[in-house]
Amino acid sequence: DIHLTQSPSSLSASVGDRVTITCRASEAIGHYLAWFQKKPGKAPEALIYTASRLQSGVPSKFSGSGSGTDFTLTISSLQPEDFATYYCQQYDTFPYTFGQGTRLEI
Amino acid sequence: AQLVESGGGVVQPGRSLRLSCSASGFMFSTYAIYWVRQAPGKGLEWVAVMAHDGSTENYAVSVRGRCAMSRDNANKTLFLQMHSLRPEDSATYYCARGDNYFGLDVWGQGTTVTVSS
């Protein structure tokens, strides 16, 4: 299975900050990486697909980059509603594994 | 586009449960459907997928041999039949539509399964 390692596991930031989360794959996955936002009691929300493209309706404050094994998610101008847990997921090879999550806290 | 899960509940270890995923607002028969679960306090875990036409399925090792998916494209519904349930299967189960380019882009709100005696 392809293992995804996110760093950091948790992150403290303030409203207005810009943060970056990284996701490293145990083997190359091309650009088949997605990012999700997860809040307690809510369904995951898809943010980014193919490493860098925004899902429909997702604000441009979210951006992604990378290919192969190293990927990043950047969130600019943090707002209170952005504090959540973020997951990366590879969809290159079954099983479509997730990273362990990065908890973004105020 | 919307997905709605149902069928969760409290079940004893070793028993079976069938989850449903009902779709609306999009052409259900053209999408693969995935199941992803989240155990309390844990991260997201990919569980299973069925191709748009039901021709192929793939399961995580953790549930392989104990789960089977089926779909009824005419009624826009997909099912996850779970057998020999274990306490570690306790989780909120989400269904999601996906394709090879956009990934898992639409998710249901989830249905909770609790396996306990």
Image (cartoon, rainbow, N blue to C red):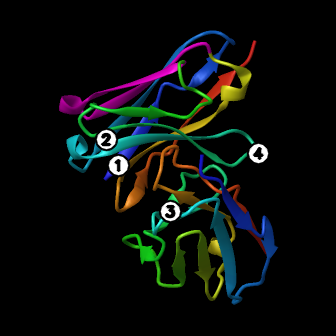
Question: Residue sitting at 52 percent across and 57 percent down?
Answer: A90
Mark 2 to mark 1: distance in Å?
6 Å
Q: Nearer the viewer, residue B20 or B53?
A: B53
Q: Residue at x 53, y 19 (%)?
A: B65
- Give residue B41's mark: 4
Amino acid carrying label 2: it is: Ala
Label 4 marks which chain's residue? B
Both marks 2 and 4 on one chain = yes
**Looking at the picture, does residue B96 appear above or below residue A32?**
above
Question: N-terminal of the two: label 2 or label 4?
Answer: 2
Are circles 2 and 1 on residues that touch, CB within 8 Å? yes
- Nearer to us: label 3 or label 1: 3
Query: In this rendering, would A17 be left or right of B102?
Result: right
**On the image, numbered disc 1 is attached to which residue?**
B2
* Badge 4 and badge 3 both on one subunit: no
Residue drawn where x is 46% and y is 67% of the image: A30
Q: Which mark is residue A29?
A: 3
SS category of the residue bearing label 4 = loop
Q: Earlier in the sequence, mark 2 or mark 1?
A: 1
